[in-house]
């Protein structure tokens, strides 16, 4: 064996898969949290627009569709993180 061959370390295959699974889990949590934050921001924007336009159509849409979505996504996020 030469020096170059002995210096290279081989990472076990199971460790690579463990790292991939952990990274995929973190990415999945980030996507869920991003969807939750976006739906909350859109809901808040609809309420503010309704406040200035003296209308309630956007508020009704947000209450009917976006609030249940954001609640479901937040519950899913807290369910997937142990101890939260």
Image (cartoon, helix red, strand yellow):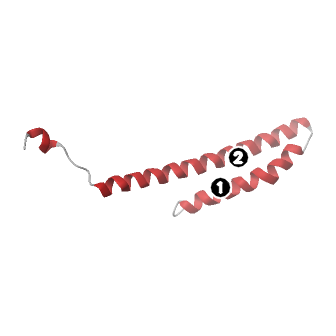
Q: Quadrant of residue 8?
A: top left
Q: Nearer the viewer, residue 12 or 41?
A: 12
- Residue at point 83%, 37% (across, down): 49
- Residue at point 70%, 57% (across, down): 71
Mark number displayed over residue 73: 1
Helix, strand or loop at mark 2: helix
Q: Quadrant of residue 48?
A: top right
Toward the top, the furthest residue is 52
Task: Locate residue 16, reporting x and y percent.
Answer: 33, 52
Position of the N terminus by quadrant: top left
- CB-based contact (under 8 Å), mark 1 and mark 2: yes
Q: Is 18 on the left or on the right of 71, as rendered? A: left
Q: CA distance from mark 1 to mark 2?
A: 9 Å
The residue pinned by badge 2 equals 39
Mark number displayed over residue 49: none
- Residue at point 30%, 55% (across, down): 13
């Amino acid at each position: 064996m030469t020096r170059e061959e002995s210096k290279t370390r081989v990472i076990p295959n199971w460790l690579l898969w463990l790292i991939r699974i952990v990274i995929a889990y973190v990415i999945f949590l980030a996507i869920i949290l991003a969807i939750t934050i976006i739906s909350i921001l859109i809901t808040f924007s609809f309420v503010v627009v309704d406040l200035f336009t003296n209308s309630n159509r956007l508020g009704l849409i947000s209450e009917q569709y976006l609030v249940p979505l954001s609640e479901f996504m937040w519950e899913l996020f807290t369910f997937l993180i142990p101890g939260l």
